């Protein structure tokens, strides 16, 4: 993208490298952080940074952040013009994802980090939904960063501890305030005039393909123009890498003002 002449900015979100809890999977916080990073980039970029137009591209949590950027942009940053939202394996229907993911160590890992974060951001009582034995493991996981593939591998040991003892309830969505928080941080449909690119790996066991396909269907039903790219044989970790060429081409067309494509209604 740099070779193509783009100015590229990436937010680190609050609480990562700075004091305080990171608002993990807190959609409004993520969206504001993305928009703040665009504003900062415009200030730093010199003459080339004076354009109002920008696009967003994110993976997993970043995909959720990209979608919430689309939801917040006009209200929070009316000084900017969002030309398109691209997301790979985004976290959408959180209640479904979290309970379905509990069959995998990665899913337990991400659910644990979400519970840890929301207990601090929203003041929700984590001790009412997890077992006492799981709390030290959750604290350990919440204070380790995932920066490389090796970090993912290193987290397997504490993640396996959650197999023995984790949730004290059958379904988080059955308990308040967790039910409300899950709904609050599940992205809704975007304004119809914001085009969307969605990429999803067909073998993803963390963000399930059917969940992303359901979100695509909701967007299409709401009248959005959605380009959906199902990447065969790719899991969660590498879908952003493998979908990047298509996403970058799609973003370039949005900046050029080309009509947004849509494969709504197609399998």
Image: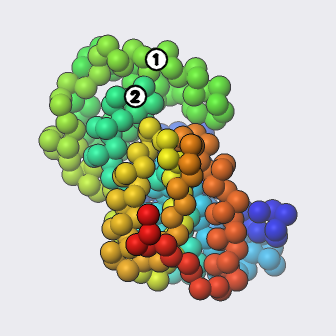
Residue under label 2 = 104
Q: Is residue 219 visible?
A: yes
Q: Position of residue 150 (x, y in %)?
A: 65, 25
Q: Where is residue 46 in the image (x, y as percent from the top left)?
A: 81, 73
Task: Give the left or right position of residue 205, taking residue 37 as reference.
Answer: left
Instruction: Report which quarter residue 146 is drawn in.
Output: top right
Which image quarter is the C terminus in? bottom left
- How far is disc 2 from disc 1 in space, using C-alphas? 13 Å
Disc assigned to residue 28: none
Location of residue 243 with respect to 3 vertically, above or below: above
Residue at the extreme front: 267
Disc assigned to residue 158: 1
Task: Identify the residue at image location x=85%, y=63%.
Answer: 3
Q: Is residue 13 visible?
A: no
Task: Give the left or right position of residue 151, taking residue 31 as reference.
Answer: right
Location of residue 150 with respect to 70 vertically, above or below: above
Assess whether mark 1 and mark 2 are in contact (beta carbons under 8 angstroms).
no
Which image quarter is the N terminus in? bottom right
Location of residue 71 with respect to 88 vertically, above or below: below
Q: Where is residue 230 in the image (x, y as percent from the top left)?
A: 52, 56
User: Crowdedness of circle 1 by 10 Å Cα count: few (<14), some, many (20+)?
Assistant: some
User: Crowdedness of circle 2 by 10 Å Cα count: few (<14), some, many (20+)?
Assistant: some
Task: Identify the residue at image location x=14%, y=41%.
Answer: 174
Q: Where is residue 49 in the image (x, y as percent from the top left)?
A: 75, 75
- The answer to which of marks 2 and 1 sits earlier in the sequence is 2
Q: In the depicted view, which residue is nearer to us: 180 or 190? A: 190
Instruction: Report which quarter residue 130 is drawn in.
Output: top left
């Amino acid at each position: 993208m740099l070779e193509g002449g783009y100015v590229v900015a990436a937010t680190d979100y609050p609480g990562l490298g700075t004091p305080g809890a990171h608002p993990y999977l807190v959609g409004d916080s993520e969206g504001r952080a993305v928009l703040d990073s665009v504003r900062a980039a415009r200030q730093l970029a010199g003459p080339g940074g004076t354009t109002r137009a920008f696009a967003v591209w994110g993976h997993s949590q970043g995909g959720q952040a990209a979608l919430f950027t689309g939801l917040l942009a006009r209200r929070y940053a009316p000084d900017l013009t969002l030309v398109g939202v691209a997301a790979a394996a985004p976290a959408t229907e959180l209640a479904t994802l979290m309970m379905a993911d509990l069959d995998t160590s990665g899913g337990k890992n991400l659910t644990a980090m979400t519970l840890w974060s929301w207990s601090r951001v929203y003041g929700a009582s984590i001790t009412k939904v997890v077992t006492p034995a799981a709390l030290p493991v959750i604290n350990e996981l919440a204070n380790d960063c995932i920066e490389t593939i090796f970090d993912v591998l290193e987290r397997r040991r504490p993640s396996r501890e959650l197999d023995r003892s984790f949730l004290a309830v059958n379904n988080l969505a059955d308990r308040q305030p967790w039910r409300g928080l899950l709904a609050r941080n599940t992205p809704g449909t975007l304004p119809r005039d914001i085009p969307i690119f969605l990429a999803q790996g067909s073998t993803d066991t963390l963000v399930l393909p059917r969940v992303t396909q359901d979100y695509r269907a909701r967007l299409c039903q709401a009248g959005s123009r959605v380009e959906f790219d199902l990447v065969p044989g790719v899991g969660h970790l590498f879908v952003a890498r493998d979908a990047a060429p298509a996403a970058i081409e799609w973003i370039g067309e949005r900046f050029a003002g080309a009509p947004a494509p849509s494969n709504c209604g197609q399998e």
